[in-house]
Amino acid sequence: AQSQYAPAAHVPLIKSPGLRVPPPVHLPPDIHPLPDSVIPYFAYPYTLEPLILTVESSRRTTLAAHTTRREAYIHARDEERDRRKREVLRRVAPGFDPAAPLVPLRATHSEPSTGEIKKDVMDDLVDQLARMDKET
């Protein structure tokens, strides 16, 4: 069982002078070993300082106030939008309330008195245009 590389086993290899194996690292004998107890090194008390506690408390209070104000604003905006929708629906169907069954309101027709003269649509239009001219 001869290897296929047997003829090349005796060929001398040329090494590059730039490639070399680094010398082994020797550690000095005076490295500082760990002490038996590390408790003396714990000089700092790992507790929160009062300054941090007060800053954090005020930050949380401010965030809670902003959240409350934002929620109140959103609630008021939603209520205003719902009120406007209800007003539009009441103009279309008087007496309409989405939370209750529809109860139609009677339209009150008043009899024109003898002194009242029924106005024409064109008269109303002319009056409105005159009012608009006065405002501008």
Image (cartoon, rainbow, N blue to C red):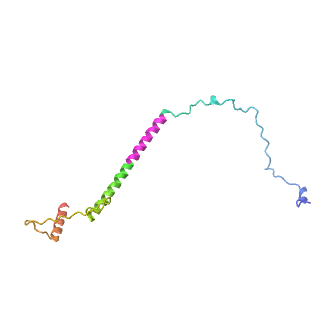
Magenta span: chief secondary structure: helix
Query: In the rendered image of this protein, does residue 98 appear above or below residue 62?
Result: below
Left/right of residue 79 with respect to residue 126 in the rendered view: right
Left/right of residue 24 with respect to residue 123 in the rendered view: right
Asked whether 129 falls inside the magenta stretch, the response is no
Quarter of the figure that contains the C terminus: bottom left
Left/right of residue 113 with respect to residue 80 in the rendered view: left
Left/right of residue 53 with respect to residue 33 in the rendered view: left
The answer to which of 66 and 29 lies nearer the viewer is: 66
Query: Residue, x 36% and y 49% (percent of image)?
Result: 72
The answer to which of 10 and 3 lies nearer the viewer is: 3
Query: Residue, x 44% and y 41% (percent of image)?
Result: 60
Quarter of the figure that contains the N terminus: bottom right
Q: Tell me the magenta residue range.
A: 51-69
Query: Residue, x 45% and y 38% (percent of image)?
Result: 57
Asked whether 53 falls inside the magenta stretch, the response is yes
Question: How far across and down, in percent of the image, does residue 30 sit?
Answer: 74, 31
